[in-house]
Image (cartoon, coloured by chain):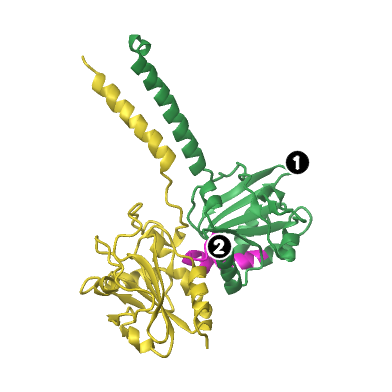
């Protein structure tokens, strides 16, 4: 009986193991025990999968979206009042996203010190966003649903990925409504709070 | 056995051996979480800059230290993240445990606490410390190197390391999630 195929298959499998052992590192992010068993892990994703449609210096495209508190929020309502940190996260109930906004949640005073407000956005629908943020213990900043028309705001900014979720993207928009900072982050990694606050420091404070 | 005499067979055995070594190495690196009865990995941690925190840990002028060098009969290590809502909710509980341990400290029953911020920069650790008025040292692990060595545990994760009469250290507690009542946790680790 010719068993040469077994040898070839075995060899291929072992080679795959060796290669994987040398190049694959499991994603490293401290997943909160609070979400244990409730997080869908998609695995490593293409870092960026969209083409930006706005630039620093542009007037930020205005939008109105429903928030989980029941009110509609319009970007331009903050014009002349607050700097806006627009924080797109790809999807609720996923590893990195679930450990991002809770950090901003304990930094309310730091954002306020820079006369800034955070607007969290994802393409999830309101019930999903409500349940997810409740699991975090609630958030002080508005959380907006860009669900329908699906991802329209993400698309206008050029951060809608080909699979229908948004990038992990941060836009800082000053009180004049002008985009002053853009970070289209590797979707697999969490942007640091520090980098956002450093950019806010460059804007006029109260 | 005749096959082993052939070049492909020898290559196969060699590859198999290599693969086993590679997987063993990977598995060891990813399962560094110490079990109860084991030893805490000898990881070099950056010593706090705050002199009061250095005094608390008994570190002197060292730039780095290991958990085994902390001057205490029991060291509780909390792996946390400022981005983790559970860690945020647990912060007052751990602070209460610190206060209790300080109150009960006496020779032979000294307890020290140390936090390691998984994936947190020094700035982020400081935000957490200020927000929750954390009275014990928090060490940044911005590149997750400590977290990876400890098996990428969920946060918060608590590991308690006891110093035996012979000076040897061993892990007596290793668990994710809340420590529960500070009084019960203290009794569990130190007795009445």
The C terminus of chain B is located in which quarter? bottom right
Q: Residue at x 76, y 52 (%)?
A: B108
The location of residue A44, given as percent across then percent down, is 36, 52
Asked if residue B179 lies left or right of residue A19, the reply is right
Graded by Cα atoms within 10 Å as few (under 14), some (14 to 19) or many (20 or more), the crowding at tag 2 reads many
The location of residue B116, given as percent across then percent down, is 58, 58
Do circles 1 and 2 both sit on a common chain?
Answer: yes
**Image height check: is B97 above or below A78?**
above
Viewer-side residue, B131 vs A117: A117
Q: Would you say the residues marked 1 and 2 are in contact, meaning their CB atoms lie under 8 Å apart?
A: no
Identify residue for label 2. Answer: B121
The chain drawn in yellow is A
**Image height check: is A5 above or below A27?**
above
Query: Where are the magenta residues, as a range?
Result: B80-98
Asked if residue B107 lies left or right of residue B85, the reply is right
The chain drawn in green is B
Q: Is residue B122 magenta?
A: no
């Amino acid at each position: 009986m010719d068993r040469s195929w077994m040898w070839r298959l075995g060899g291929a499998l072992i080679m795959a193991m060796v290669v994987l052992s040398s190049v694959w590192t499991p994603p490293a992010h401290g997943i909160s025990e609070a979400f244990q068993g409730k997080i869908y892990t998609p695995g490593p994703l293409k870092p960026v999968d969209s083409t930006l449609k706005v630039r620093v210096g542009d007037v930020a495209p205005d939008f109105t979206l429903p928030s989980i508190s029941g009110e509609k929020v319009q970007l331009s309502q903050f014009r002349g009042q607050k700097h806006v940190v627009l924080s797109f996260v790809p999807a609720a109930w996923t590893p990195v996203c679930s450990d991002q906004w809770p950090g901003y949640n304990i930094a309310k005073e730091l954002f306020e010190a820079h006369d800034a407000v955070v607007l969290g956005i994802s393409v999830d629908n309101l019930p999903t966003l409500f349940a997810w943020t409740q699991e975090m213990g609630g958030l002080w900043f508005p959380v907006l649903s860009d669900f329908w028309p699906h991802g329209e705001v993400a698309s206008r900014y050029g951060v809608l990925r080909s699979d229908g979720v948004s990038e992990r993207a941060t836009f800082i928009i000053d009180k004049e409504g002008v985009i002053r900072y853009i970070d289209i982050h590797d979707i697999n990694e969490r942007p640091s709070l520090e980098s956002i606050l450093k950019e806010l420091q460059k804007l006029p404070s109260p | 056995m005749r096959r082993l005499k052939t070049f492909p067979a020898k290559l196969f055995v060699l590859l198999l051996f290599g693969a086993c070594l590679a997987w063993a190495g990977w598995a060891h690196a990813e399962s560094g979480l110490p079990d109860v009865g084991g030893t805490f990995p000898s990881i070099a941690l950056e010593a706090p800059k705050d002199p009061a925190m250095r005094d608390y840990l008994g570190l002197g002028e060292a730039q780095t230290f290991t958990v085994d060098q902390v001057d205490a009969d029991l060291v509780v290590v909390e792996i946390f993240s400022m981005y983790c809502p559970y860690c945020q909710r647990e912060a007052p509980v751990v602070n209460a445990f610190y206060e209790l341990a300080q109150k009960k400290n006496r020779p032979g029953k000294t307890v020290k606490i140390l936090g390691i911020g998984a994936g947190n920069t020094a700035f982020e650790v400081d935000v957490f410390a200020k927000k929750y008025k954390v009275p014990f040292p928090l060490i940044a692990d911005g590149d997750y190197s400590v977290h990876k060595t400890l098996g990428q545990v969920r946060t918060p994760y608590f590991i308690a390391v006891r110093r035996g009469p012979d000076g040897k250290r061993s892990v007596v507690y290793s668990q994710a999630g809340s420590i529960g009542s500070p009084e019960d946790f203290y009794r569990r680790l130190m007795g009445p």
